[in-house]
Image: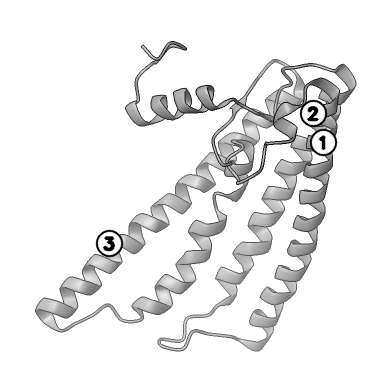
């Protein structure tokens, strides 16, 4: 499933770092949203310019292709912090305490390993584009800036996963049911309530009032 999860806070160093890093992730996520907005405006300008003035936006496809990586990757760490990535909770959702945090730790370490591999591969992909001077087909936009975004954003995700690892290790040690700095699994009712709050923008209590 995919949803935004609760992340608890306290006065510990881990929680303070989590909150500080989340502000940074939120800014990146906002930038990704602004890129989407700009692409929509450019699409409107392209359609209207082509229809009424026979003057489409030069390199519209090239710009769109390069921009896609920005809104695809700028929010990846933010989504991880919020527990918004698609995952299956059928098994781990039935676990409690140290058993739950153990499996969450293993899955986080696995994600971290895969992310590090992707960072290395995507960096060499960027390096080839930089060395060879790769550019887009239509107006010759250099492709290396978009390709550089991938390893940079994956590195930011890796740092988030390290914070998650710290949180799960701490939870595993303490055996707490409510650890800080990690997305907590929510039941369907809580998820629906949180989604209703997000959509309505109003305060809704646990009875849905």
Q: Residue at x 70, y 42 (%)?
A: 160
* Left or right of residue 196: residue 55: left
Residue 40 image position (x, y, % from top left): 31, 61
List the residue tagged with mark 3. Answer: 41
Residue 135: percent from left, percent from top: 53, 85
Q: Position of residue 19 (x, y in %)?
A: 63, 29
Give the spatial CA distance, label 1 vs label 2: 5 Å
Q: Is residue 1 left or right of residue 179?
A: left
In space, the residues marked 1 and 3 are separated at their CA atoms by: 44 Å
Q: Judging from the image, what secondary structure is the residue with disc 3 in?
A: helix
Q: Earlier in the sequence, mark 1 or mark 3?
A: 3
Q: Residue at x 41, y 86 (%)?
A: 139
Question: What secondary structure is marked by label 2?
Answer: helix
Q: Are marks 1 and 2 in contact (CB under 8 Å)?
A: yes
Q: Height in image: 19 above or below 46?
A: above
Q: Can you tell which of label 3 and label 2 is closer to the viewer?
A: 2
Would you name the residue on which mark 1 appears? 103
Q: Mark 1 against mark 3, which lies toward the viewer?
A: 1
As drawn, 6 above or below 122: above
- Crowdedness of circle 3 by 10 Å Cα count: few (<14), some, many (20+)? few
Q: On residue 164, which mark appears?
A: none
Query: For mark 2, what is the residue?
Result: 100
Task: State the CA–CA distance, disc 3 to disc 2.
Answer: 45 Å
Left or right of 112, for residue 24:
left
Counting from the top left corner in percent of width and height, residue 124 is at 74, 74
> In the depicted view, which residue is nearer to us: 192 or 69?
192
């Amino acid at each position: 499933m995919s949803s935004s999860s609760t992340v608890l806070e306290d006065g510990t160093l881990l929680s303070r770092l989590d909150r500080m890093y989340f502000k940074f992730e939120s800014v990146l996520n906002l930038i990704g949203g602004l890129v989407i907005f700009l692409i929509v405006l450019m699409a409107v300008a392209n359609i209207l310019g082509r229809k009424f003035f026979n003057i489409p936006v030069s390199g519209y496809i090239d710009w769109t292709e390069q921009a896609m990586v920005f809104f695809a990757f700028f929010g990846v760490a933010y989504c991880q912090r919020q527990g918004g990535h698609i995952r299956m909770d059928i098994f781990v959702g039935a676990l409690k305490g140290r058993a739950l945090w153990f499996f969450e730790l293993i899955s986080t370490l696995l994600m971290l390993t895969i992310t590090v591999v992707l960072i290395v591969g995507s960096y060499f992909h960027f390096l080839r584009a930089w060395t060879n001077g790769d550019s887009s087909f239509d107006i010759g936009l250099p492709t290396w800036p978009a390709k550089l975004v991938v390893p940079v954003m994956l590195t930011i995700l890796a740092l988030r996963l390290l914070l998650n690892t710290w949180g799960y290790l701490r939870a595993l040690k303490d055996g707490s049911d409510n650890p800080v700095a990690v997305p907590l699994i929510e039941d369907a009712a809580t998820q629906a309530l949180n989604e209703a709050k997000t959509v309505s923008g109003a305060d809704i209590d646990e009875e849905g009032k």
